[in-house]
Image (tube, helix red, strand yellow):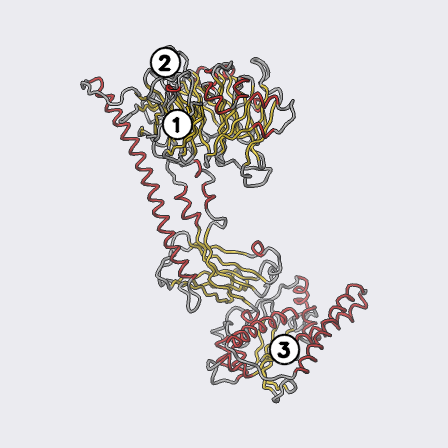
Amino acid sequence: MVGLTPRVDYLAGFCCPLGGLAAGKPRMLCLGAEIFLSTGSELVYVYDQERGLLTAVYKFPGQVWHLELLALRRALYVLCARRGIYCLSLDQASRSVSQDDGDDKDNGDDGDSEDSQDSEPPSSVIPVDPDACVLPDATLCTFTVLDDVLITLAQGPTQWKMQLFECPCPGEDPRPRGQIGEVELSTCIPPAGSPREPTAPHFLPVLCCVSPQGSRVLHSHLRGSGGFTLEETLFGLLFGADASLLESPVILCGLPNGHLCCVVLKTLVTSRLAPGDPKALVKILHHLEEPVVFIGALRTELLAEDVEESHSDCLVALGHHGRTLVMKASWDEAGNLVPVLREYCLPGPVLCAACGRGSCMYHSTPSDLCVVDLAWRGTPWDPTQPDGSPGGLPSLLCPTTLNVCSVVTLSVSPRAPEGGAELLALSAKGRLMTCRLDLNCETPCPTRVTAANTGQKIKEFLSGIFTVSERVSSLKKAVDQRNKALTCLNEAMNVSCALLSTEEGPRPISCTTTTSWSRLQLQDMLTATCLLENSSDFSLDQGWALCVQVLTSSRASELDLASSAVTYTIPVDRLGPGSRWEVTLPLGPGEDGVLDLPVTVSCTLFYSLREVVGGALIPSDSFNDPSLDEHSLDVLPEQEGICLPLSKHTVDMLQCLRFPSLATPHMQGPGPLSPASDPVDTFLGACLGPGSELAGPASLQAKYLPPSVAAIKMSVELLRATLGDSYSGVSLCCATLQWLLAENAAVDILRARALSSVQGVAPDGTDVHLIVREVVVTDLCLAGPIQAMEIQVESSSLANMCRAHHAVIGRMQRMVMEQAAQGSSPPDLRVQCLRQIQANHEMLLREVHTLRDRLCMEDEACSRATAERLLQVYRQLRSPSLLLL
């Protein structure tokens, strides 16, 4: 078939989604001149090929997955996704369409024009009555109908389930009378999502019926319903003696996991009356190791002259990636008939396939439509003579291209001419077309050029140019998308390696966070400024984003940190080498006027694989692979990107303090945030006059209650080793205070004033007093007194005192860890003194537990004294006798 060139004629165009149709869901059936077509949506079209127009459109309640046509009963069975099977009587449906609708010029085209390829459905879209659902079942994936039996295949949680239902006689209610058989097939992959809302499988299973030669099931009926008849020899070898003796049809099932199974129909019907293992009824013929997308049968050998009726002598199964299984009967060396199973590899991925009346099989890939001839070019097979055996199978299959691309569903037309073939095909762009082949002529003879055939040759030549041009443009677009994605992935890999390989020293891409107070919408707001610096040789372009996660102290104790934190994702426009980029985000206070401290700000670079690679995996052309349909992005990681941590910064009370008394008029920033005032207090204060003062809870606490105090001591040698020469020229007390407030915006004013104590204002408006002074610790060291520095925190608010004390302790911990890493050793200490301090603290902790238990049991009068004692114990714990060395 070298040089085989089809004649392609476009019949009509149907609506399709953006990006084109995907293979796997569209279906096409023929009944005389009528073509029943489903594009995978809710619509089923009826196109009259003789008149060249669209006669009717039926709208079903869900996406159509499968069609079956019963010519004898004039019935159309339709499977809707997650709905069930609907039965549509073609005689009643044809009477429901008016003659005006059928003659509408806009509903089809003349077959020679391509301008009407995107024609809309006719105005008479017929909605299918929900009562037409004869078998409601949300788990059904495919079905077939044979004589008076309806066979369905449903997807269970872990198993595929095949069920048989008895169909009523013609003229009766089309609903199945009842279930007459059931069996479970091989395991299946559980669908993602909740059990109540299962998702569609990546590939739909393939189901068909095979009958033996001489069966009472009509051959034409089998062809119309997707079944076929096999010769008795091959049928018995493949399915066993039981199927041959019973003359029972066999149900063939190709599953998405690659299993090719068979079930004898009559044994399944009678299995409910006889005990036994139901799984013994299922026979696995082969495992293709890839999803089965097509099962068909062919006649590969020539018939004797006296044989009139031909039956298929070869069974074919195709996998999604092109693996082909061919099964045929042959003789072994001992002269016994044995089944021969041979695997071939065809170009893939296979979108659809069809078997012709002869020995030709047609299959479509995203880039081409091919034909394969499996004919055995020997003498007719004489069953009585081993020498006249089938002779085996060809060692290699050589597909011949037809230069037609993007065919998503295929059907062999029954109107094929003698010695040729006619294919009905639907392209990914919704074009219905016919492809006429001349299978007899391998080398065309030169013919005389006449005016009659010149026009036809020009038309065929232009049609071929259009098809090739469409294929080349789509392939070029797909290649450009993949090249762009590979370039972006290479750049992302370089950035990732540069960041992950830097363990010490400055990082090539860094992010620093600073805080400041600003006035936003008549309210003081603490903001964080994240400065992203690119010191590498690479650029941050499409797909990169800066993720800033803000986690407050009140949410840090929650179990699910990812859901409790607030994350800001800001796409990076383009950050070239040596560039900087600033992002300012609000930290608080929130709507309740409270700023929870400390606040952790984590900066991360995120690279979105879905944004960069997604377009390359799902190209917007017409050559869609069914595995890259709505589930194509499942090949990406679960997190859908790459996360590269940059920095983590903790904003504590010492960074948020403001010192309005120290600021000069030209340097003074926003005033301290005032606590939310009660409207009643504001009204009473205005009535009392400017010299009066309300005795509210906050003012009474500040005036009469002593402030909350906490203190911590550290040795002078430890401070000098930490500070070094950076604070030379000032006293150690002043240097310590400047070191504590180094991340505060007012640190420059503190350096200019050389203060050892300072009074600041917390975010809620209360005072926080920091005092640094030198003390002497006498009883701890064996060598004598130790010069130490005491840092004292005072505040009228217990909560703010705790936050400031926590910030001081955090700095002390980092200082001790740095000095311990340098190998410094502490002096000799009095062990007895340390034990006494530890015993005192353990006693205080036990008293805390006792007092807290007592508070839960006492009444209001007695609990006041207990609370006062508990507060005293907490103050003692906040000022321990320990010394940091």
**SS label for mark 3:** strand
Which three-letter amino acid code belongs to the residue tagged 1?
Leu
Left or right position of 485 against 666: left
Which of these two is toward me, 774 or 223? 223
Which three-letter amino acid code belongs to the residue tagged 3?
Ala
Please count the marks in the image.
3
Which of these two is toward me, 194 or 529? 194
**Disc 1 from disc 2: Cα separation:** 37 Å
Determine which of the numbered discs, if any, sits on residue 711 in the image: 3
- Choose the circle earlier in sequence order: 1 or 3: 1
Is residue 122 visible to the viewer in this orientation of the structure?
no
Which three-letter amino acid code belongs to the residue tagged 2?
Ala
Is residue 750 visible to the viewer in this orientation of the structure?
yes
User: Which of the two marks, 2 or 3, is nearer to us in this view?
Assistant: 2
**SS label for mark 1:** strand
**SS label for mark 2:** loop
Q: Picture quarter containing residue 84?
A: top right
Q: Are marks 2 and 3 in contact (CB under 8 Å)?
A: no
- Choose the circle earlier in sequence order: 1 or 2: 2
Q: Picture quarter containing residue 709?
A: bottom right
**Disc 1 from disc 3: Cα separation:** 83 Å
Q: Position of residue 155 (x, y in %)?
A: 56, 33
Q: Name the residue tied to disc 2.
A: 304
Q: Position of residue 402 (x, y in %)?
A: 31, 28
Q: Name the residue tied to disc 1.
A: 426
Q: Which residue is pictured at 18% across the width and 18% down the height? A: 448
Left or right position of 752 against 858: left
Which of these two is toward me, 752 or 646? 646
Q: Which residue is pictured at 50% across the width and 72% down the height? A: 743
